[in-house]
Image: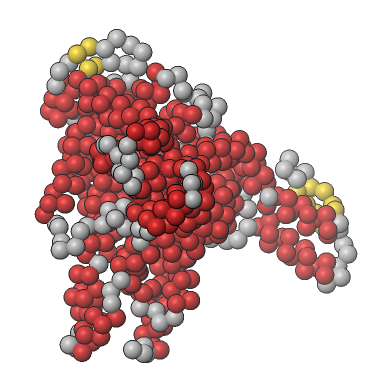
Amino acid sequence: MRMSRARLCAIHAALLTFAALTLLPFFFLVNNIFRTNAEFYHAFFSFPKAFDQAIRLTGRSLAGDEAPVEVEDDDGQTREVSKAEGIRHHLARAGQGPRRAWRIVRPYMINSLIVSGLTALGVILFGSTTAYILSRYRFLGHRAIFLLILSTMMFPGVLTLVPSFMLVTKMRLLNTYWVMVLPYVAGGQVFAIFVFKSFFDGLPEELFECARIDGAGHLHLYLSIVLPLSKPVIAVVLVMNVLGTWNGWLWPFITNPEGTHHVIASGLYVMATTSHASNFSTMFAAYAIASIPLLILFIYATKPFIRGMTSGALKA
Amino acid sequence: MRLQGRSTLTCYGIILPTMVMLLTFVYLPVVWAFSKSFYAFEIGGASRFVGLGNYSEYLLEDPTFFPSLANMLLLTLFAVVVRLTVPLIVAKLIHSLPRERWRYVYRLVFLVPIVVPGVAVQLIWAGLIYSDSGLVNEFLRWLDLSHWTHGWLSDPRTALVCVAMVGFPFVGAFEVLIYYAGLSAIPQSVHEAAAIEGATGMRKFLQVDVPLVLSQLKLIAILTVIGSVQGFQSLIILTRGGPGFKTTVPGLWMYYNAFSFQRMGYACSIGVLLFLLILTLTILNLKYFKSSETVQGI
């Protein structure tokens, strides 16, 4: 069925409107990373002045204008410098927010990488091994165990938040990485087991039978058959898990009362409750920096992820 | 493969870490949630058995109970309505494009906001959209409507509406992908048959597409309800439940009781009540909205 040109244009127009409205806050976010508070208050809808001036100076120096220019330092003093120096000065001013933000969030980012990395590793390891056993072997209680694992899905976070906090306090885990990693792996592996198991259930038994006849043990089967085959499933589990652990801020916030192990999400909340909050470019730059690792993850994992989501890695 | 003896032991050994973690970090807190809800205590302090006292106090005496329940219901209802409509419309628009390349590009575009942490998104809405010199007020000033500008999140009349509007225009990437998968699964022959019957445009969408993605709609509906009933984290960032109790929800009150007022048992009882509510809604959903095909669970 062919579609009329007008109809096609209307669909594109509608989709572009939705996309523009969706991305609008992020556009203003990026714009304000390079602007001062004064610009934010007095000229909400304009572009960064520092870039504006840098571009103007570049234009003038390209036109052959060699005269020195005046720039204003942070302390309000003005001085005369060459055009190249002036351009550098304005770009440095635009970069102030990101530089300051990076100094603040660097420890948070490192903590996040450690926590999300360890959690993803644990979830994929324990999720895939348990799913492999439950999918390929029949032994006493295998059904009961699977039910016991699955039924944890019916307990919402709101039920366990307070008692979990009492538990980790009693276990003396507060202000450590483990206070995040252990509960995250415990909860995250359930979804992984579910997804891995439905994938393994679909694999032909002959595949495993042959290897077993050749004398392959569990470890060999797992490394040479299970892992290589489940790459698309690992992509879905990895993305969903990292999304969750990277975004979770409440649990890291309440379990780090001394503030020593804040991850990026709880770190952003902490920043917003301190004096940093009054410095908009720093805050906005911190939000942007916090998004970069997930952006990188998505650049690598989007294709298998979209394919996994649409082709039924998530279906029961 | 059927097993006995040593191999069975190996199997138990391999799943042992999973079970230990689940019993420690999921089942033990679940048991505690119920058992500790009958006590009044602070962390590290002496605990006193109060029976159903926490429950009766919350349901009968707590001044936040009715306003917070009303807020939660309104926010949940609103979330369900927008998540069942907007992403479906967007998914349908994307799906009706003739070229795969464009369909892929649009799916990708709507996936982009996912990389921004939720806490940052809410801080952006509080600081960049709703603040005194934020997008909404500046836009009104630009339109010469300065007398309409005000503190959107601090005005009792607008706070709840503004909380609900966070995330506008509500094109959730996961919902779009799930609806898109549902629309892709509809065989071409169905569309051809509908075309022969003379169904076009809106009527075709409502009578052919919507019934055939019903299982996806149900899935999103129940996930949204479960998420909204226990969703309070964004409110800590946006309004802290204020002004007054205008944007307080039960989950938020549980959080404040546990971590600000040190009433752990009372907080547990609110958590248990919310769990029972979610459980009831899930069972109702499974029982009364079952279609011929099984509901797909995530």
Residue toward you, A2 or A316: A316
The location of residue B120, given as percent across then percent down, is: 48, 46
The location of residue A168, given as percent across then percent down, is: 40, 24
Q: How is the image coloured?
A: secondary structure
- From what the image shows, is residue A156 above or below residue A63? above
Q: Is residue A53 left or right of residue B42?
A: right
Residue toward you, A131 or A295: A131
The location of residue A210, given as percent across then percent down, is: 44, 55
- Kindly tell me whether residue B284 is visible in this rendering: yes
Residue A101 sits in which quadrant?
A: top right
Residue at 34% over, 45% down: A137
Q: Is residue A82 left or right of residue B260?
A: right
Q: Residue furthest right?
A: A66
Residue toward you, B174 or A15: B174
In what quadrant of the picture does the N terminus of chain A appear? bottom left
Residue at 23% over, 80% down: B190
How many numbered marks are there?
Answer: 0
Residue toward you, A194 or B280: A194
The location of residue B50, given as percent across then percent down, is: 17, 16
- Kindly tell me whether residue B75 is visible in this rendering: no
Q: Is residue A1 left or right of residue A292?
A: left
Residue at 14% over, 30% down: B59
- From what the image shows, is residue A3 above or below residue A38? below
In what quadrant of the picture does the C terminus of chain A appear? bottom left
Residue at 44% over, 32% down: A182
